[in-house]
Amino acid sequence: MSFNFSFECVAECKHTKARAGIFHTPHGIVETPRFMPVGTLANVKTITPAQLKDTGAQMVLSNTYHLHLQPGEAIVAGGGGLHKFMGWNGPMLTDSGGFQVFSLSEMRKITEEGVTFRSPHDGQIINLTPEKSIEIQNILGADVIMAFDECPPYPATREEVETATARTYRWLERCIAAHQRTDQALFGIVQGGVYLDMRSSAASSLAAFDLPGYAIGGVSVGEPPELIHQIVEATAPLLPYHKPRYLMGVGTYQEMAIAIASGIDLFDCVIPTRWARHGTAMVQGERWNIKNAKFREDFTPLDETCPCYTCQNFSRAYLSHLVRCQEILAYTLLSIHNITELIRFTQKIRQSIINGTFATDFAIWLDTSNESKVLSAE
């Protein structure tokens, strides 16, 4: 089966590079800008696909590295492919596994061929190459798959970043040659660390491949927010206009708003569910510890304006009680709210772009002098 992936821009901001678009995939459309929840092991932690749909999620992520280790792509294929296996019939994206492998700094060896690492589950030696990453993703069957890349850490020397960026380009060539399915869109990933000239060169080189979409990787890996802003502002406009642009691993209010102003369309981050598992709620850009004493007898919703199941049915006091008792329901209810919160934020931005009011409506989040507004994932 083949599919003609396409991206159409339906509105643009006159004062920034922000745009509202529609990305067409085999399993439906994605209205951009859009936050995408992360379902690493074929599930978004603590919530069901039905609950996930109610948050407004359109596209969901899973991870090649983790699914290869457990349960294995053959089992996912036996279950009918990733969509059927996890009960999600909307658009899906799989990360290549590159970031996860490179985070195993003491357990892996990088060569031109690929990466050799020791499985954290059973100690087995595993070889992951660009070809193998694509093969696994072809078997998993997501709508969008990512090229296998080398993600340099921060800080890293210019020489280290040059080596990783050049290798990422060569690995992309191999990913393109290995890709077998016309119903899956292969996205290339721009690396280059904090070196803007390297980012520019990498973006231009990748754009020449005319892929269905492009991502900016290697950000939010320890560098300060102002460097993230500079990287995205310099890189995003260099990527093809009529293709979706994806900023990997970013999901705070200010980081998303500034990236959207630079022309980014898609985002993902684990913080909504990770924070939920730590008893933390995201409320209109603020980070609340629900265990705080002030919430114990507060019988109002987390956010009276929020349409999510949690806010429509439960009080802050009840959530505080559940968190203090370490009830699993606490993590489910907070995850539902936190995911809804970030998706609503990108939905509101999309509507403001269509209305022509983005630059004014979201001015507070575009003001980089107020870095206290940035929600940290630490």
Image: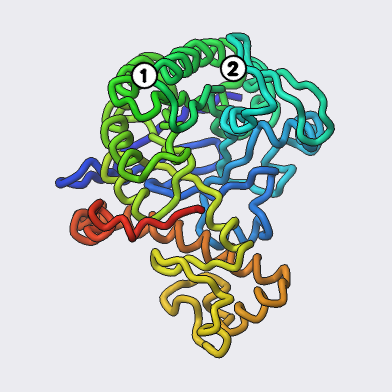
Quarter-of-image position of residue 179: top right
Whole-percent x, y for residue 296 in the image:
57, 86
Residue behind mark 2: 179
Q: Are marks 2 and 1 in contact (CB under 8 Å)?
A: no
Residue nearest the viewer, comparing 89 with 262 = 262
Q: Relative to 24, is 107 on the left or the right? A: right
Q: Relative to 39, is 373 on the left or the right? A: left
Query: Where is 284 relative to 238, above or below?
Result: below
Residue nearest the viewer, comparing 214 with 367 = 367
Q: Could you tell me which secondary element the residue under label 1 belongs to?
A: helix
Whole-percent x, y for residue 377 in the image:
49, 53
Kindly identify the residue that appears in the image at 41 percent across and 22 percent down. Answer: 157
Which mark is first along the chain, 1 or 2?
Answer: 2
Q: Could you tell me which secondary element the residue under label 2 belongs to?
A: loop
Kindly identify the residue that appears in the image at 67 percent across and 32 percent down. Answer: 65
Name the mark nearer the viewer: 2 or 1. 1
Q: Relative to 185, is 375 on the left or the right? A: left
Quarter-of-image position of residue 79: top right
Query: Where is 137 relative to 263, above or below?
Result: above
| Numbered mark located on residue 202 in the image | 1
